[in-house]
Amino acid sequence: MTSLYDQLGSMTVIVADTGDVESIERFKPRDATTNPSLITAAAQMERYQDVVDRALERSRDEVGSDDAKVVARAIDRLAVDFGTHILAIIDGRVSTEVDARLSFDTQATVAKARQLIGYYDEAGVDRERVLIKIASTWEGIQAAGILERAGVHCNLTLLFGMHQAVACADAGVTLISPFVGRILDWHKKASGRDEYPPEEDPGVLSVTEIYNYYKKHGHGVEIMGASFRNLGEILELAGCDLLTIAPKFLSELRDSGGELPRKLHPDKCKHMDIPPLSVGKEEFDRMHAENRMASEKLVEGIEGFSRATSALGELLENRLAELEGGGARRRRVAAFFERYDLDGDGFITREEWAGSDAVFDALDRDGDGVITPDEMAAGIGCAHCLPELTEPR
């Protein structure tokens, strides 16, 4: 019997939501996407230590003695190095993220994107195989429009509402990434419901609405559903242009059989009564303010991605110190944990993490929904840091 994975792949492009080259080698998706928290997880693995070390050494040579500048350069270099490794395995594209801390600065986002694509150019990578990932703020969407007109393709992430989707279409971006699971998280918390059937899942309904709008009005923007909480969400979006899926769900799809009907199809949208929308800056701001879910999740997502970038920086600072004879590992791991433990209760919840679901799941070794100090220390290879991490604050 044909697996659900193969059936899904016949109607939807499957993207691996991981920075782990081993997982990508196993599942052979067409495209892949990374972010700082995924890269942080991969950078902990012994097999990639030489990649990390080379990025740091090269950055030191390029920027000199300023450790902060070395680490900042190494973050970008490492993102491109992992992207290049991934592109050697897959046939399609890899998404590489602009620092989320620049999300409300159009010109800074454009400059960072050009720097990243320049590194790919140096590595001999065809620009058609790279998507620059940018948060779907108004400023980020405008930056993407500038980049697209210059031949740099963009993936607009942290997208939660129709106003963002329409603005992205108007800007001519290549791809958008609506966050299915995070929309569900918000609605479960707001409504007090423990679960939603897949066909009523608010995240599924949001992606379906965007898909129907784009296909009805002939927008060529690709739609890539992201951030899934369960297999039902994925199956309910069969037929979406792309779906980026964590390895645990890719395994479930590969190990499961049964018939998978196509749920989304462009032909079904032709006769739908869906009026066109016009979303300029004023309309975008109004719609965004009225959509509490989108407003809250966008800010939360940017903060989470920013923390992930800062955490990756701390990891690289620690490794740089080790390479150059330093010994600040205990302090840095403690700071790493405290960065995410926002309420100081000694546990990191999924809501506090707000970074990659795949990395949270990897660190949450017992699957109880929180990351403890020992899980964090084990996850970053520093069990001897536990006394400092667990002492009262």
Image (tube, grey):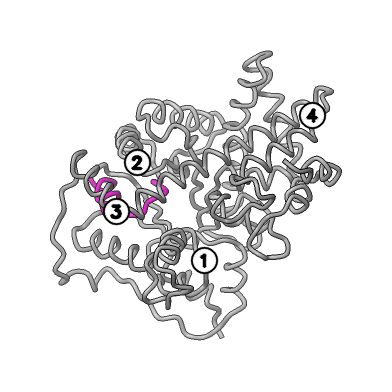
In the image, is residue 152 part of the stretch drawn in magenta? no
Where does the image place residue 247, in percent across and percent down from the top left? Answer: 61, 62
- Using the numbered discs, state the Cα–Cα distance from disc 3 to disc 4 in whole angstroms: 44 Å
Spatial CA span between label 2 and label 3: 14 Å
Q: Earlier in the sequence, mark 4 or mark 1?
A: 1
> What is the CA distance from the residue labelled 2 to the residue labelled 1?
24 Å
Q: Which residues are magenta?
A: 155-170
Element type at mark 2 = loop
Quick check: 324 left or right of 77? right
| Quadrant holding the C terminus | top right
Q: Which residue is mark 3?
A: 291
Q: CA distance from mark 1 to mark 3?
A: 22 Å
Packing grade of label 4 (10 A; few <14, some 14-19, many >=20) is few
Q: Are marks 2 and 1 in contact (CB under 8 Å)?
A: no
Residue assigned mark 4: 328
Crowd tier of the residue under label 2, counting other residues whose Cα lies within 10 Å: few below 14, some 14–19, many 20 or above:
many
Q: Is residue 253 above or below residue 160?
A: below
* Closest to the observer, 197 or 319: 197
N-term mark: 1 or 3: 1
Residue at the image point whose x is 62% and y is 70% from the top: 251
Of labels 2 and 3, earlier in sequence is 2
Residue carrying label 1: 229
What crowding class fits label 3: few (fewer than 14 Cα within 10 Å), some (14-19), or many (20 or more)?
A: some
- Which amino acid lies under the numbered mark 4 shown in the image of this protein? Ala
Q: Earlier in the sequence, mark 2 or mark 1?
A: 2
Please state which amino acid type lies under the numbered disc 1. Arg
Report the disc number at residue 137: 2
Residue kind at label 3, given as amino acid type: Asn
Answer yes or no: do the residues labelled 2 and 3 have beta carbons within 8 Å? no
The answer to whether marks 4 and 1 mark residues whose Cβ atoms lie closer than 8 Å is no
